[in-house]
């Protein structure tokens, strides 16, 4: 870990994200790992934790408990620097601007984004607090890697306070086309915030393209290929910011080793038996979020039962929906809708032996998730818009025997890499139904051909590969592109 001066430990590598990899739990909560902490939800933590356990750096972020001040500490081999959020910050910056303005705006306005000046003020103020924490702990010339949509102003703030730093940014979610981004009243400030970085990473090539088009349109930036020449008030070049795609991935070794463990294989068998040994188990695993297309998935499955193309003895859908952002209105509405629909489907089609949908509003440890991946014949990823979707990559990685089928939305970033998945448009319910049937009926030969090809892709591009690629590009000497 880092050196200490002026009372603060200094680091030459820092990651900054809204969330730390651990989340404070209330005493007595059954998700406690025994230390008063549990693993934080979502793809960002899944992807970054493996790198940070192997790196001598610090992770700056929020520890999940409003109003609680926590001193820097270590957990799971990582140095963590907590940033405090008050109850108001949580409401205005996190639930408000991050998750009721930016999240829906960046996901194709599936839900209507709300624009409130008080939320924006809180967003700026909290971004400043994260930047200040970095400034205190970053050694001269350190590399700082800022993560995701909650912290888009931090790169600019860091550059102004500490021009000595190497500043990277990675956006884990989609970046919308300029026609949609245009709605944001603070669009210039956001683009300007991001352009404070030396390198801005995105999941898809199309996200990087969207960002560059917005930089040109809303800031009049001079965009040359993948570069923006960023100038100060006097028109002097301060630095070159680059935008590029770096598709994120998972810890392949961890997942495939768990999938080979005899106790986990046995657990998968047990799960199938507990479900009444249907011929086919379909699986959905998502944070309970309106971007994930859970309602479209349920609709397609219900219609297959109604049409008689499936019975509950043929197929059961296990839907894990992990609790998420439960105080945000759109998430409450979604939960009610999904739970109403599941109750309706089960009431109509269940028998005493079999259930149509086994709905689980929980999050589970990774061992149990891998057992579920092994128990499932068909994985359904039907997102309406998703930056990447690591669940798709985890499922494929867990299938050590090259069997199973992945139904994957073309609106998930993972579709750019997993071209041998059964790709679907989740809005096309008829097409989705047919593809689910194709997946159920896939010949072992065809399933294996597709799975092998997808596994090869992921095995060659695990998350270490992702972070190494990004950091290599961040530290590379930039050749000015004047073409
Ligand atoms: C997505 C976002 C992350 C976020 C995660 C969980 O993966 O890209 O930034 O941390 O969802 O959401 P939460 O609001 O609980 O942090």
Image (spheres, helix red, strand yellow):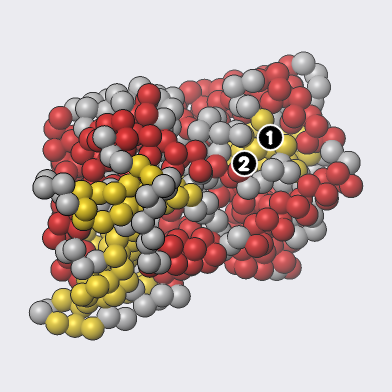
Question: Which of the two residues, 481 or 198, is positioned nearer the viewer here?
Answer: 481
* Pointers 2 and 1 in contact (C-beta within 8 Å): yes
Dot 2 beta carbon under 8 Å from ligand 1: no
In x, y percent, where is residue 189? 21, 39
Which quadrant, please, contains the N terminus?
Answer: bottom left
Question: Which of the two residues, 476 or 92, is positioned nearer the viewer here?
Answer: 476
Q: CA distance from mark 2 to mark 1?
A: 7 Å
Q: Residues within 10 Å of mark 2 (few under 14, many from 20)?
A: many
Residue farthest to the front? Answer: 483
User: Is 258 placed left or right of 70 in the picture?
Assistant: right
The quadrant in which residue 408 appears is top right
Residue 90's label in the rendered image is none
In x, y percent, where is residue 373? 67, 51
User: Is 91 placed left or right of 111 in the picture?
Assistant: left
User: Is 445 placed left or right of 213 in the picture?
Assistant: right
Secondary structure of the residue carrying tag 2 is helix
Labels 2 and 1: the sequence-earlier one: 2
The quadrant in which residue 136 appears is bottom left
Secondary structure of the residue carrying tag 1 is strand
The reply to whether residue 263 is in sight is: no
Q: Is residue 458 above or below residue 125?
A: below
The quadrant in which residue 425 appears is top right
To which residue does mark 1 refer?
A: 423
Tell me which residue sits at (20%, 75%) in the image.
140
Dot 1 beta carbon under 8 Å from ligand 1: no
Residue 415's label in the rendered image is 2
In x, y percent, where is residue 161? 13, 60
């Amino acid at each position: 870990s880092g050196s200490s001066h002026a009372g603060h430990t200094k680091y030459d590598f820092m990651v900054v994200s809204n969330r730390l990899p651990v989340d404070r739990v209330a005493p007595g909560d059954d998700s406690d790992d025994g230390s008063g902490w549990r693993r934080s939800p979502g793809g960002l933590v899944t992807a970054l934790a493996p790198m940070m356990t192997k790196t001598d750096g610090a992770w700056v972020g929020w520890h999940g408990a409003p109003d609680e001040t926590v001193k820097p500490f270590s957990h799971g081999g990582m140095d963590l620097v907590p940033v405090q959020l008050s109850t108001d910050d949580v409401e205005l910056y996190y639930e408000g601007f991050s998750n009721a303005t930016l999240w829906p705006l960046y996901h194709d306005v599936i839900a209507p984004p709300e624009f409130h000046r008080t939320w924006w003020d809180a967003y700026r103020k909290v971004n400043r607090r994260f930047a200040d924490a970095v400034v205190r702990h970053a050694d001269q010339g350190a590399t700082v890697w800022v993560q995701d949509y909650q912290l888009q102003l931090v790169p600019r703030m860091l550059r102004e306070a500490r021009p000595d730093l190497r500043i990277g940014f990675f956006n884990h979610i989609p970046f919308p086309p300029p026609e949609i981004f245009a709605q944001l009243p603070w669009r210039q400030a956001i683009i300007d915030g991001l352009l404070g970085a030396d390198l801005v990473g995105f999941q898809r090539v199309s996200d990087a393209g969207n960002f560059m088009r917005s930089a040109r349109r809303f800031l009049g930036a001079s965009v040359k290929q993948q570069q923006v020449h960023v100038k100060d008030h006097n028109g002097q070049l301060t630095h070159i910011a680059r935008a590029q795609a770096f598709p994120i991935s998972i810890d392949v070794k961890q997942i495939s080793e768990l999938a080979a463990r005899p106790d986990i294989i046995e657990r998968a068998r047990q799960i199938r038996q507990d479900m009444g040994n249907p011929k086919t188990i379909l699986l959905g695993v998502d944070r309970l979020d309106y971007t994930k297309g859970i309602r479209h998935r349920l609709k397609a499955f219900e219609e297959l039962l109604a049409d008689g193309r499936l019975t509950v003895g043929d197929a059961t859908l296990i839907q894990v929906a992990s609790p998420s952002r439960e105080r945000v209105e759109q998430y409450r509405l979604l939960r009610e809708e999904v739970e109403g629909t599941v109750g309706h489907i089960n009431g109509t089609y269940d028998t005493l032996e079999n259930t149509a949908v086994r709905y689980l509003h929980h999050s589970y440890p990774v061992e149990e998730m891998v057992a579920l991946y092994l128990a499932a014949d068909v994985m359904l990823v039907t997102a309406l818009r998703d930056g990447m979707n690591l669940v798709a990559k985890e499922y494929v990685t867990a299938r050590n025997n090259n069997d199973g089928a992945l139904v994957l939305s073309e609106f998930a970033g993972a579709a750019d890499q997993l071209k041998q998945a059964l790709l679907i448009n989740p809005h096309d319910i008829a097409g989705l139904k047919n593809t689910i049937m194709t997946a159920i009926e896939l010949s072992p030969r065809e399933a294996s051909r597709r799975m092998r090809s997808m596994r090869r892709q992921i095995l060659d591009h695990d998350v270490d590969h992702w972070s190494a690629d990004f950091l290599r590009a961040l530290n590379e000497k930039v050749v000015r592109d004047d073409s």
